[in-house]
């Protein structure tokens, strides 16, 4: 089974508008971390935001916020006030904090975000 | 955070040759991770490299094809051996600092 599911291959948003990128995850661990990364065409992976499974508050980093709904196992990324430079591929990822897979990340298939003027 | 320097940033190689990718971190880390991203795909873990021990490879990846060195706590190399066009991918190293996983700039490899 997929550990990370991103159901939106592509999303379009107008500049200055907000956009939500969806992510659901699957784990039986009680302790895990959720991440969002931005990958521009250059190929680098840029860390955006992190949410721990025990964090009660939703994580925020500037224009990025993570809408964490633990019971629904969802970790959607919200980008407020979109900018043209936000156009990129966005990956959701999870790290399980226990067991033999300690430290590794599981990635979704990504969502290509296009911001238009 | 961590500053990760990965070299080369890109290369075009002939089939049958090998390429070694270097990853240098500005702080000591226990584990370093190597990922592959095939064109249009997500990231897949190749192996986990601990200093002083053999790397641990994921299913589908073998040491003869992707030998890894980890001579100290700030440096690692990944070699892509006997390359074929199917090895054309972005290769990324990653480390965990605190709770966050950081990545190098990636190596975009094209095999012709």
Image (spheres, rainbow, N blue to C red):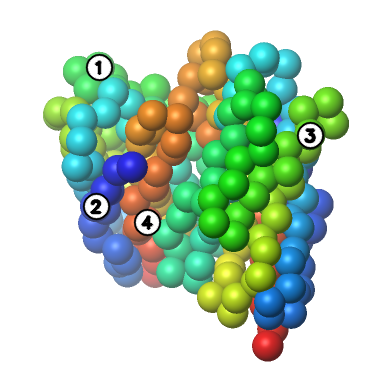
Nearer-N-terminus badge (2/4): 2
The subunit carrying tag 2 is B
Q: Which residue is mark 2?
A: B5
From this view, report whether residue B55 is shown above or below residue B76. above
In this rendering, position of residue A25 left or right of residue B93: right
Q: Are marks 3 and 1 on the same chain?
A: no
Residue drawn at x 23%, y 56% as measured from the top left: B7
- Confirm whether residue B42 shows in the render: no
* Residue B18 rendering spot, x and y as whole percentages: 26, 52
> Which residue corresponds to mark 3?
A69
The residue sitting at 20% across, 18% down in the picture is B52
Percent x, y for residue B70?
21, 30
Please say if the residues under marks 2 and 3 sit with CB atoms less than 8 Å apart.
no
Mark-to-mark CA distance, 2 and 3: 35 Å
Q: Tell me residue B59's x, y (percent).
A: 53, 28
- How far apart are the alpha carbons under marks 2 and 1? 22 Å
Residue in view at x 44 percent, y 36 percent: B100
Q: Which residue is mark 1?
A: B53
Q: Which residue is mark 4?
A: B106
Residue that extends furthest to the bottom in the rendered view of this protein: A117
Distance between the Cα atoms at labels 3 and 4?
A: 32 Å
Q: Of B56 and A50, which appears nearest the observer?
A: A50
Give residue B61's position: percent from left, percent from top.
46, 34
Residue at (48%, 50%) from the top-left corner? A47
């Amino acid at each position: 089974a997929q550990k990370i599911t991103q159901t939106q291959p592509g999303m379009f948003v107008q500049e200055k508008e907000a956009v939500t990128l969806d992510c659901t995850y699957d784990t039986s661990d009680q302790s895990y971390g959720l991440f969002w990364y931005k990958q521009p065409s250059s190929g680098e992976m840029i860390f955006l935001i992190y949410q721990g499974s025990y964090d009660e508050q939703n994580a925020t980093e500037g224009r990025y916020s993570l809408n964490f709904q633990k019971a629904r196992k969802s970790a959607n990324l919200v980008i407020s006030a979109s900018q043209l430079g936000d156009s990129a591929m966005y990956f959701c990822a999870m790290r399980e904090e226990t067991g033999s897979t300690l430290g590794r990340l599981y990635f979704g298939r990504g969502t290509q975000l296009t911001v238009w003027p | 955070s961590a500053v990760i320097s990965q070299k080369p940033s890109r290369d075009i190689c002939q089939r049958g040759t090998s390429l070694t990718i270097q990853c240098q971190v500005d702080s000591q880390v226990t584990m370093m991770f190597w990922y592959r991203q095939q064109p249009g795909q997500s990231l897949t873990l190749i192996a986990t490299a601990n200093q002083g021990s053999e790397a641990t490879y994921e299913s589908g990846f073998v040491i003869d094809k992707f030998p890894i060195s980890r001579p100290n706590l700030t440096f690692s190399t990944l070699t892509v051996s006997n390359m074929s066009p199917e090895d054309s991918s972005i290769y990324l190293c990653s480390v965990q600092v605190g709770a966050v996983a950081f990545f190098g700039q990636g190596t975009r490899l094209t095999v012709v």
